[in-house]
Image (cartoon, rainbow, N blue to C red):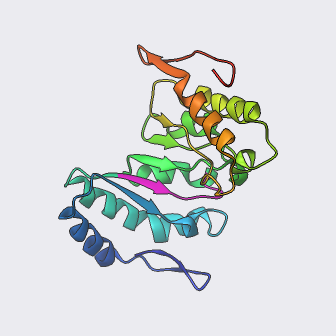
Amino acid sequence: VEGVRDGRPCKPDPAGALEIAERLKVAPVDALYVGDPSSSASLISPQHFEEFCLPCFRLLCEELHKSDILIYIHICGNSKPILEMMADTGADCIEPLDPLGGVDVADAKRRVGGRVALMGGVNTLTLLEGTPPEAVYDESLACCRAGGSQGGYILAAGDMVPDLAPEASVRAMVAAAKDCRYNGGELCVEVKPPGQ
């Protein structure tokens, strides 16, 4: 319904966005993942995002919210220059806060955390073989601390957990998330040595 085709930005297609929204309204859908990596500032300018992508995202979110469908938008790569516009889409959550694309969880939280939930931040390469689980745990905990104040943050990889990620790395990320609790809206971290 928008984005890039053949390496060039294409015109927004509001009718296409509405058609998709209408089909989803009758489906048993609670939440919808909208993946659009071609909207990344790694590929198109923020001006092109505003002109070609933002109108359709807004329309899609507005229509789907009428049916109480939660929406999270995945724009990987360099989303730093478009964070505010991503929040302006009306999505409930934006992700993946890709550090390989220059996105910092604390910066994203400061800029748009009061308007939209945030998800991601753990460097995808950290999850690959060769990184000790303790380092994965530490990076995951740092992401929780950077994004978790006042809620609205979901710990996840900066793009996707790689297929080749060792189970110990994934478990370390999960352990860091479990060690974080909220008390009166404030993030409390109970650090446990790995393996406990």
In this rendering, position of residue 69 left or right of residue 109: left
Quadrant containing the N terminus is bottom left
Please state the horizontal and vertical placement of residue 161, each as a whole percent of the image: 61, 51
The residue at the point 68 percent across, 31 percent down is 137
In this rendering, position of residue 82 left or right of residue 54: right
Task: Give whichever of 115, 97 is nearer the camera.
Answer: 97
In this rendering, position of residue 124 left or right of residue 187: right
The residue at the point 45 percent across, 28 percent down is 151
Quadrant containing the C terminus is top right
Q: Is residue 137 magenta?
A: no
Q: Is residue 72 magenta?
A: yes
| Above/below status of 22 relative to 186 | below
The residue at the point 50 percent across, 66 percent down is 36
Please state the horizontal and vertical placement of residue 194, each as a whole percent of the image: 68, 24
The residue at the point 50 percent across, 41 percent down is 118
Quarter of image, res 155: top right
Quarter of image, res 172: top right
Please state the horizontal and vertical placement of residue 69, each as a whole percent of the image: 27, 52
Please state the horizontal and vertical placement of residue 180, each as a whole percent of the image: 53, 22
| Above/below status of 58 relative to 91 | below
Task: Give whichever of 58, 104 is nearer the camera.
Answer: 104
Extreme residue in the bottom direction: 6
Q: How many marks?
A: 0
| Above/below status of 172 relative to 119 | above
In this picture, which residue range is highlighted in magenta?
A: 71-79
